[in-house]
Amino acid sequence: MAGAMDWAALSVSLRLAALTCLILLPLGIWLGRALAYARFRGKGLCGALVALPLVLPPTVLGFYLLLSFSRDAPIGAFWSELTGSGLNFTFSGILLASLIANIPFAVQPIQRAFESVPRNLREAAWCSGLGPWQTLWRIELPLVWPGVLSAFALTFAHTLGEFGVILMVGGSIDGETRTLAIAIYDRMQAFDEQGAALMSAVLLAVSFITLGIVYGLAGRRRWVSD
Amino acid sequence: MGALRWIAAFAFSVMFTATASAKPPVVAAASDLQFALSEAADAFTQQTGEQVRLNFGSSGNFRRQIAQGAPFELYLSADEDYVFALNEEGYTRDEGVLYAVGRLVWLQPKGAGTLPRQEAPLAAVEAAIAAQASGERQRIALANPEHAPYGVAAQQTLEHAGLWHATTPLQVLGENVSQAAQFALSNDTRGGLVAYSLALAPALAEKSDYVLIPESWHAPLNQRMVLTQNAGETATAFYHWLQSEKGRAILQDYGFSVPGFSVPE
Amino acid sequence: MTDLKVCLAQDGPIPLAADFTCRRGELLALVGPSGSGKTTLLRSIAGLYQPAEGHIVCGETSWFDGKSKYSLSPQKRRVGIVFQDYALFPHLTALENIALPLRHLPKPTQRDRAEQWLSSVRLEGLGQRYPHALSGGQRQRVALARALAREPEVLLLDEPFSAVDQVTRRRLQRELALLRQQIAIPIVLVTHDLDEATALADQICVLHGGESLQQDTPDRLFRQPATPAVARLLDRHNLFNANVVTVDGQRYLQWGRFSLEVTEGLARFAVGEAVTWYLPPSDIVLHRRDRPSRGERENPIPAMVSEVVALGGITLVTLRVAHGDMLRFDIATHAARRNHLAPGAMVNVSLLAAGIHIMPGTHDLARSD
């Protein structure tokens, strides 16, 4: 045990990060586009809500999540009804927490990217006979692709590094809610510096490789936007 | 969109690994058991082939998490009051059993100043307080008394010696007693008041010195374990195994006084 | 005969009260100062903007009807549009940009057709370039080819020459004039450049504050603006107030102390009515010192030279008549020299009766310029 790699924790971390990205990116594209294009009352409020997890201490987020995930609270009760298990101290729970904590990282880069697409490019697409979905797929997405990649990188890396919220909501259960970041903390607590060092190196490498791949992809454009 | 496809494939492959196998029960244990219980669990696994997953932390935190629905099946608290409280709220099977009585020690890094003598175990604390006058700040580590039983005991000990208020500016609080021990062994502290069971662990023994604190200086660290309402067969077996001859022997090796079940308290 | 008929109205946020028609094969220029609603009208035709009221009909098809809240989507209108900044898709090559409206065709046909359009705007061999690697003029051509590849029923051009230098602009304008001969659809050009409109358009529609004030051929528009406001928007000078009078049963225009003969138009007004009249600069004839000029006997007026500005071969001359009104015209610089035109000199001019255009009402003569 001492000095060893906690593969289960790595698996939890990767699963958590991958699922968070998989669920959050389509949502980020939808929400980021809506916030970039739409004009509606309360848009500012919406933007503030999206950015909120960015400024909140993880403990505040964790506190409210713990409260709302409890079986007495509507969200926890609903989930319990649906799946038969609670949200606190489960993988589903830390996934939901991670989704909420990462909203700004997924939405904001995509929103900025959509904002930088000139309106008349979309209009030119419509006037070329492209429907809304074709316009999204063939014109808008290729143009906001760097923003999407950046959102992916930020969300993925941030989920790998998330600690406070996950610890509060998940409670460090081996193979379920103990992520690599928490395992490192636990190893330190157990005076296993060798194990902590090994896992820190792995986390560092995974994060760096992910970011490297993403920024490599983002830099591979043949055209330059102007 | 090649990248998107790769990401999706990667995500799915990661998603469905390491899921859906029957998981061993999770045990929540006070962090003074960090080494003792790890050894006990290994022995249990060797003997029975069954596995348990160990979660170490502060007893107070676990007490809260169990009330919030954490899926722990066995709870080993360093403070029996937490067990009684959970029992009253209906989260446990019964009142559980007293499995050990803990001891507090003064722990300091090996070779860092003189080790206090048995008769005056808090001499180093007094020295640290005195050193403040010359502008030197020697920190004292202890577990957070808000939710860690060993922190409570440390506070009572310092109060008993009339040093609590004088040490307030010097205190560095660990989230649990294990972290407090870690702080105590860092070069930035003079030492700390931590669990005897940790001081005896090989990982610490080689780099630290300790002196026992008299039991009468603080309320007894009565450690009680209990099966929760979701306890399954394996957890129950481990619960009984810990009370067996072998289980008690391991706890005793780590400095716990273990109540003999034939011997009344 | 595929005509484009546009009639739109709304009070706000952008006020509109426009009514114009563009025939098949005709180029209609919408001119007006910035904020006159030109671009909004163009966007309305494309279906990118929906005004409150009115209708847009292309040939037999209704594109927009305010009454029944009917609006055909931009995708279904078959409009080719060239945006002011061209709006080329930066992530697609020139050829891919042009092929985008051709997606309903089989792939090989798409490519062939796009190549054809590329060569019709004389960009052979540049199909694989991305927009950022093309010059301003080349981008404009790609945008035009993309608009035409749509096989549109209407071609819309939003200030298409404003983003290029003057030499390129001349060349592109010439190419557009040539291209027009090959496509028989209504073309609507938005511009604030009157010279460009005059040079390219068959019809000009003058807009102000979203309102269409007058639609006519450039020649008629410049000689006979419907109102003083139109004349102003067309940057016309020589607008004056006068009264209709009769002398011996003959009607004249009383301008200061001069009674002016007018060939046409006086009959429409009552005797004593205050009107505004306009004279194109070409209908002001300077009496030469050495020999008599054409039409010298028509409305001879003495005036003092107030300003002489030589701009290359043309000299702009401003004259002041006795009651203070200023007459402006231009003559060849060599003629100005020969006649010793200099500030302070007295000259005689004739105001040709056939050129005098009378408009109802008076207007404030104080010009801001």
Image (cartoon, coloured by chain):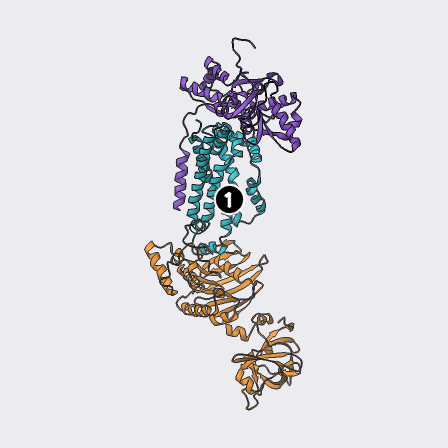
Tag 1 secondary structure: helix
In the depicted structure, whether residue B251 falls above or below residue C159? above
Q: In this orientation, does residue C72 appear? A: no
Residue at x 58%, y 56% (from the top left corner): C13
Residue B64's spot in the image, x, y percent? 56, 25
The answer to which image quadrant residue C114 occupies is bottom left
The answer to which image quadrant residue B167 occupies is top right
- In which quadrant of the rendered image does the C terminus of chain B lie? top right
Q: In this orientation, does residue B108 appear? A: yes
Which chain identifier belongs to the orange chain? Answer: C
Query: Circle 1 marks a residue in which chain?
Result: A
In the depicted structure, whether residue B82 falls above or below residue A222? above
**Chain B visual colour:** purple
In the depicted structure, whether residue B183 falls above or below residue B200? below
Residue at x 64%, y 25% (from the top left corner): B126
Residue C295's spot in the image, x, y percent? 55, 86
Residue B241's spot in the image, x, y percent? 46, 15
Amino acid under disc 1:
Val
Q: Circle 1 is placed at which residue position?
A: A107
Which chain identifier belongs to the cyan chain? Answer: A
Residue C273's spot in the image, x, y percent? 65, 76
